[in-house]
Amino acid sequence: MGLVEGESVKALHVVAAVIRGTDRRILLAQRPAHKHQGGLWEFPGGKVEPGEAVEAALARELHEELDIRVEQARPLIEVRHTYPDLSVLLDVWEVSRFSGTPRGMEGQPLTWAEESALGSFAFPAANRPIVTAACLPADYLITPSDLSASALLAGIERALAQGIRLLQLRAPQLSSSAYRSLADEVLALCAGRARVLLKGPLAWAADFPEAGWHLTAAQLRELGTSVRPLPVGRWLAASCHDAEELALAESLGVDFVTLSPIQPTQTHPEATPLGWVQAAELMRGVNRPVYLLGGLGPAERERAWQQGAQGIAGIRGLWP
């Protein structure tokens, strides 16, 4: 990616690519030993030239570095990171279709990695949120709060068949014991098919080691800037509604957040919508994948991407 070309460089705008093959594996390149962060693995890309559009820089860099031509790409995440000797803005795009066979035009080693194996590679610190974004899908399903346990199980089965890979089991209508029992069934149903985040007292987390956890805004504020309550490797998410909560989530080390409400919703009619413009402004300072939530469905997914979001989260909008 060429993060540093000389000691005088203080700030860089870089474009990077999560390049997926037809088997969904992701292309990684190894940085030359003599460069900044040498020997570490990275997502291919390079510097955006002054006055150059980011998408144009993406196409140019991938052709120069890998001898491929981008045919389909979309924004994935923006990451801002400060090293001791420079600051960098990483404009990250997901490339889902390209022509040509990637080869290291500058002699850099390349490898195709499974999503599940990305955690075993050594990346520059600025790349860590990109790894998370690369592993997360575009849709985050949240279960409705007005269904029985059996209806929830049936709906989750339908959602899995339709391709849902990430879901939050939210069921405030159930008793604690009924929720915990349902959680066991949902985790068994989703094993090897989708990642599940549970919601409830953090004291329960130790009883469900295979599950991630979604913090409410109240839990997030209660935790403040304390130690991350789940080990790295278990998804930890948080519900956020303003800049303060987003900052708390980032300082706590969550993997991703939901930002809501974007539009008026039936579930929270009293909440004042953020709107698309304010949501985009709030996301600009967050180095975490953000799912936009509130009155959204698949029709808004593309707009969410263009605003800088990972994708959409939804209850009614995504429930099958």
Image (tube, helix red, strand yellow):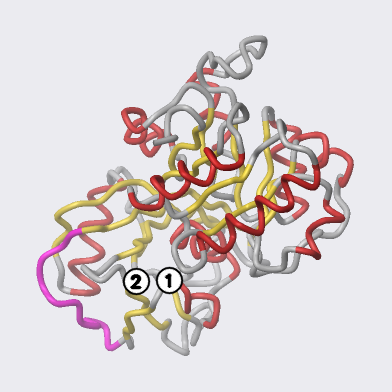
Q: Residues within 10 Å of mark 1 (few under 14, many from 20)?
A: some
- The C terminus - image quarter: top left
Residue 241: give x, y in percent of width and height: 67, 28
Left or right, residue 156 beside residue 202: left
Q: Residue under label 2, please give it.
A: 26
Left or right, residue 111 beside residue 11: left
Residue 150: give x, y in percent of width and height: 56, 42
Of callouts 1 and 2, the N-terminal one = 2
Q: Is residue 265 above or below residue 146?
A: above
Looking at the rendered structure, the secondary structure element under dot 1 is helix
Identify the mark at residue 289; answer none if there is no mark.
none
In this rendered view, identify the residue nearer to me: 152 or 191. 152
Q: Name the residue at 18% across, 67% down.
A: 63
Q: Residue under label 1, please give it.
A: 115
Say which amino acid is labelled 2: Ile
Q: Is residue 154 above or below residue 110?
A: above
User: Is residue 209 highlighted in magenta?
Assistant: no
Left or right, residue 213 beside residue 288: right
The answer for how far apart the CA atoms under marks 1 and 2 are is 7 Å
In this rendered view, identify the residue nearer to me: 245 or 63. 245
Residue interval drawn in magenta: 97-107
- The N terminus - image quarter: bottom left
Q: Nearer the viewer, mark 1 or mark 2?
A: 1
Q: Are the residues tagged 1 and 2 within 8 Å (C-beta)? A: yes
Looking at the rendered structure, the secondary structure element under dot 2 is strand
Q: Name the residue at 21% across, 60% down.
A: 60
Residue 269: give x, y in percent of width and height: 61, 11
User: Is residue 104 highlighted in magenta?
Assistant: yes
Say which amino acid is labelled 1: Glu
Principal secondary structure, stretch drawn in magenta: loop
Q: Is residue 192 above or below residue 74?
A: below
Q: Quadrant of residue 32?
A: bottom left
